Image (cartoon, rainbow, N blue to C red):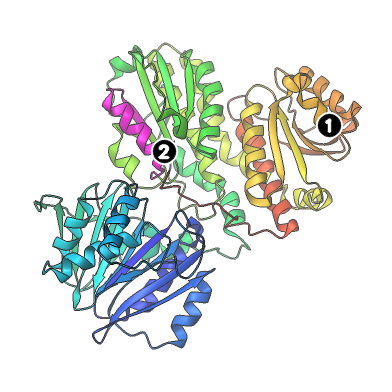
């Protein structure tokens, strides 16, 4: 979602701000702006559209002040425009804000009745006017921010500067991620660690209802009652090279190609072949609970939900425990029945998804043990779950998730294996699962070599505006994720069905204008899936099949076939997903869409 960057130090703020905004472009945005305190004045530039346009305007102006704030906005209240872009200014104050002020109508009405004139349609502008009013009354900037946010209902990641106080930036957080970067006689504020990579690797993650006062030589963190919180900076392992394209045309292709490494990094040190189990030291749940566990409840949004759905098939088969999978956006509003012996698994790449966070907090309120499968170290979910594991997939910059999905599924296999062995899975079967996991990076690498062939097929089919993805058993969640991916990056209509359900309505959609991507590798349901494929062909559907190497029969039924290497049932669905990622990527490139930053989408959805 929106991005925040702030700088205070001895250098020029503007290059740090625009550079940080560039690195957060992947989060999704429609406008951008910066404000800098310079020689007793607040100088600001805002532009609708890309950060590059803002950077050009900044370069053409004389911005040399040593303190400032910047923002990329994703519209919630008010259309994309320069007027609605951040920073917002009032009096001597400039602010940037992520989140939603739920009571902004009441706050705005009160301010309007007092004679305040608003220049934007945003909820954020009320914060600028409220802070400005307290400053004019004689409050120092930290007090003004504190008094303002105490009246706010909703969420905020907030950074504030005051024209006459170039020695301080104040930040505050509730429900929207924010961190402090600790440099050498300089400090940074950011909503995402990628914004400050190359400047410092020392960070302090703010918790909800904390206020940070940042000066060039240090920082203080306080709660809403002005009590100091002792917070020590931690070191993050993030390098500039990991957030650059490394010669690829797009981050999406780079991240697809990184999957052999990202899966290898996930598995490293976590497999115990001798005992046929996995070692997950961070679960923080006693083995006795896991032996008596009666149910999994998996929470995710978007691609993380589909990873959880695939995990359901694999975990139930492995552990013999029922698995329920819920969208975070739905679960948070339900009245779920949470039985004793439930283990909740929270799946999230960013660790900041608002609906997932709200679901986690409800589960904790009800006393359900929670495991996080999280990619971003130090994220909110990672800090609040009882235990779990980091995916170690590395930064995922493209909005469309690929390597995180693969790691999320593999992580569920690791979790399931440890629990299954505690519940009586044989050592022989455990070793078989480990052998499959050890084989996974190599199988992914083999499949990625199909990229040139898949690129040609994507060009062949790129004129289709409608697609249906079909699969059975574990391949149905893969079909869902495949249709999700091509929708995200190419903007065509696509949906997925369990292949056996086509007769119950979806067959009506099949004609020569429908592209059908059919997952039909040689597994236990091969013959049934093959029959379903024949039904599609009989109705003139254009079929692109994903099949197992050496299966010549499928070539007789499909228009085109992508052959994947033969693999264990435990990893076959992961392998089958790789061609779908590549196909979506090349399909979108052929259609000329913005592959890394699809329209109307954001990487991390930190507001409801």
Magenta span contains residue 343: no
**Position of residue 105 measured from the top left corner of the image (x, y, whole percent):** 35, 51
Q: Is residue 430 left or right of residue 161?
A: right
**Position of residue 374 measured from the top left corner of the image (x, y, whole percent):** 40, 40
Residue 591 against residue 275 in the figure, above or below:
below
Residues 148 and 304: in front is: 148
The residue where tag 1 is placed is 510
Q: Residue at x 44, y 65 (%)?
A: 84
Residue 508 against residue 90 in the figure, above or below:
above
The first of marks 1 and 2 along the sequence is 2
The residue where tag 2 is placed is 355
Residue 300 in sight from this viewpoint? yes
Residues 76 and 418: in front is: 76
Name the secondary structure under disc 1.
loop
Residue 293 against residue 356 in the figure, above or below:
above
Query: The C terminus is located in which quarter?
Result: top left
């Amino acid at each position: 979602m929106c991005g925040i960057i702030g700088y205070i130090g001895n250098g020029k703020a503007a290059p740090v701000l625009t550079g940080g905004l560039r690195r957060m472009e992947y989060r999704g945005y429609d406008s951008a702006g910066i404000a800098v305190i310079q020689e007793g004045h607040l100088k600001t530039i805002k532009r609708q559209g890309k950060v590059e346009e803002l950077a050009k305007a900044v370069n053409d102006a004389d911005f040399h002040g040593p303190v400032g704030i910047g923002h990329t906005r994703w519209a919630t209240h008010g259309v994309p425009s320069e007027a609605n872009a951040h920073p917002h200014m009032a009096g001597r104050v400039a602010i940037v804000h992520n989140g939603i002020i739920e009571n902004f109508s009441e706050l705005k009405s009160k301010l309007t009745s007092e004679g305040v004139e608003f220049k934007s349609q945003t909820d954020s502008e009320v914060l600028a006017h409220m802070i400005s009013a307290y400053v004019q009354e004689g409050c120092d900037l930290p007090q003004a921010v504190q008094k303002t946010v105490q009246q706010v209902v909703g969420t905020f990641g907030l950074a504030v500067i005051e024209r006459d106080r170039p020695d301080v930036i104040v930040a505050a957080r509730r429900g929207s991620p924010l961190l402090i970067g600790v440099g050498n006689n300089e400090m940074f504020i950011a909503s995402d660690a990628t914004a400050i990579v190359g400047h410092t690797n020392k960070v302090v993650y703010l918790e909800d209802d904390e206020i940070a006062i940042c000066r060039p030589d240090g920082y203080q963190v306080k709660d809403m009652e002005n009590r100091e919180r002792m917070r020590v900076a931690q070191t993050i392992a993030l390098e500039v090279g990991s957030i650059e394209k490394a010669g690829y045309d797009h981050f999406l292709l780079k991240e697809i190609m990184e999957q052999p490494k990202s899966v290898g990094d996930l598995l490293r040190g976590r497999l115990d072949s001798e005992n046929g189990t996995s070692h997950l030291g961070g679960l923080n749940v006693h083995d006795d609970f896991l032996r008596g566990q009666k149910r999994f409840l998996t929470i995710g949004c978007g691609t993380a939900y589909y990873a959880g759905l695939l995990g359901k098939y694999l975990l139930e088969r492995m552990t013999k425990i029922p698995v329920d999978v819920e969208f975070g956006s739905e679960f948070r509003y339900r009245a779920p029945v949470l039985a004793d012996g439930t283990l909740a698994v929270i799946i999230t790449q960013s660790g900041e998804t608002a609906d997932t966070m709200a679901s986690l907090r409800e589960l904790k309120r009800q006393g359900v043990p929670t495991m996080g499968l999280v990619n971003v170290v130090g994220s909110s979910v990672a800090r609040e779950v009882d235990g779990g594991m980091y995916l170690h997939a590395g930064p995922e910059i493209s909005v469309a998730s690929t390597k995180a999905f693969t790691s999320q599924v593999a992580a569920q296999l690791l979790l399931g294996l440890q629990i299954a062995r505690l519940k009586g899975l044989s050592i022989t079967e455990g070793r078989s699962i480990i052998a499959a996991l050890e084989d996974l990076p190599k199988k992914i690498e083999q499949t990625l070599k199909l990229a040139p062939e898949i690129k040609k097929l994507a060009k062949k089919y790129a004129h289709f505006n409608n697609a249906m993805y079909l699969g059975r058993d574990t391949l149905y969640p893969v079909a869902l994720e495949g249709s999700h991916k091509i929708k995200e990056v190419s903007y065509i209509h696509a949906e997925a069905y369990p292949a056996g359900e086509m007769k119950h309505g979806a067959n009506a959609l099949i004609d020569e204008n429908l592209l059908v991507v059919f997952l039909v590798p040689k597994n236990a349901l091969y013959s049934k899936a093959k029959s379903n494929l024949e039904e599609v062909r009989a109705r003139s559907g254009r079929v692109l099949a994903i099949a197992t190497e050496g299966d010549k029969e499928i070539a007789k039924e499909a228009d085109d076939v992508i052959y994947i290497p033969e693999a264990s049932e435990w990893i076959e669905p992961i392998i089958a997903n790789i061609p779908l990622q590549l196909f979506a990527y090349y399909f979108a490139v052929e259609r000329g869409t913005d592959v890394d930053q699809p329209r109307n989408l954001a990487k991390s959805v930190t507001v409801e």
